[in-house]
Amino acid sequence: MLGCGHDKKPFGAPVCVHLRIGREPWLSYLRWYTGHGMDMELLCSSCVAEREKGQSVTTEFVCQECFEFATTEIGDLEGVRGKPEIHIRSEAFNPQLRMTALPTEVGKIVDISPIISNGRSIWLLLAEDGWLVKFDASTGAWNRLASTSLAPEPDHQPWCGHILKRHLHSSPCGDFAAIVNDYGRCGQIIDLKSGQVTLALDGITIRKRFRFRSRLRRSRAGSSPFIAPPGTGSTCPILPPEPC
Ligand SMILES: [Zn+2]
Ligand SMILES: [Zn+2]
């Protein structure tokens, strides 16, 4: 039997009693890393204060439904305490850096992002002309995946000395990429399998959407997500741009 009283499988991280029995939003809570791997407990602020004073605080596992209710309808994540475990590799490893020549055919490269691939050194490159290029640093092989174009934002004012420049992010598996105007407002999410833009980003619209989401969340008028996941193929925002 779980802490929530349900006879189901435990889900997520153990939670404090206040998160478990809470029925009204919003209860501030924190992730407390236990020092064992990435194990954590979820504690409300008062339980964190108790633990920091050295007092005993108990947590219990709950089922998936109760965990999701506690973390999305009741709790409001505010921070992190404790530390995850740090693994130490005992074997020596070769610290020698290996230089790899980038493909000159793709032109000037403005940003680069790693893609996780078993034992291989795979990278996504953003070329100055907007092409996204997959590059295998082990073999030198490369191929163009998609073409991107961002609005130049000529009225952009440098913020705190940061000038506008394109920045590349890729999903760890390399299925999607986001290209954004760093310190600007425009961006695109691209499906790298099809080469199509799945979401056009606009900083102003997104800020409005997040404010709207927050209001909806707090009024329990709906449930997340409110922004199209990158794989939906939608180029339209799910949320209406107003009201904010
Ligand atoms: Zn608590
Ligand atoms: Zn339950």
Image (cartoon, rainbow, N blue to C red):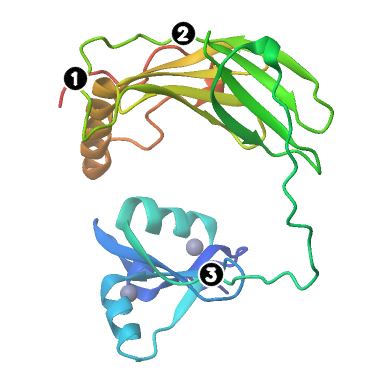
Q: Estimate the x, y position of residue 216 in percent, counting from the top left.
A: 25, 36
Ranked by sequence position, the earlier of labels 1 and 2 is 2
User: Is the shortest distance between ligand 2 and the CB of mark 2 under 8 Å?
Assistant: no
Q: Secondary structure at mark 1?
A: loop
Q: Residue at x 64, y 26 (%)?
A: 124
Label 3 environment density (alpha carbons within 10 Å; few <14, some 14–19, many ≥20): some
| Pair 3/2: label in front | 2
Q: Indicate whether 242 appears above or below 219.
A: above
Q: Estimate the x, y position of residue 177 in percent, counting from the top left.
A: 55, 24
Which of the numbered marks, if any, corresponds to residue 233?
none
Q: Residue at x 39, y 27 (%)?
A: 227
Label 1 environment density (alpha carbons within 10 Å; few <14, some 14–19, many ≥20): few
Q: Estimate the x, y position of residue 200 in percent, counting from the top left.
A: 41, 15
Residue under pointer 3: 84
One can see residue 195 in this view = no
Residue under pointer 1: 242
| Pair 1/3: label in front | 3
Judge from the rendering whether residue 31 lies leftward or rightward of residue 113; answer left or right: left
Q: Amino acid at mark 2?
A: Ser
Residue under pointer 2: 149
Q: Amino acid at mark 3?
A: Pro
Judge from the rendering whether residue 31 lies leftward or rightward of residue 87; answer left or right: left
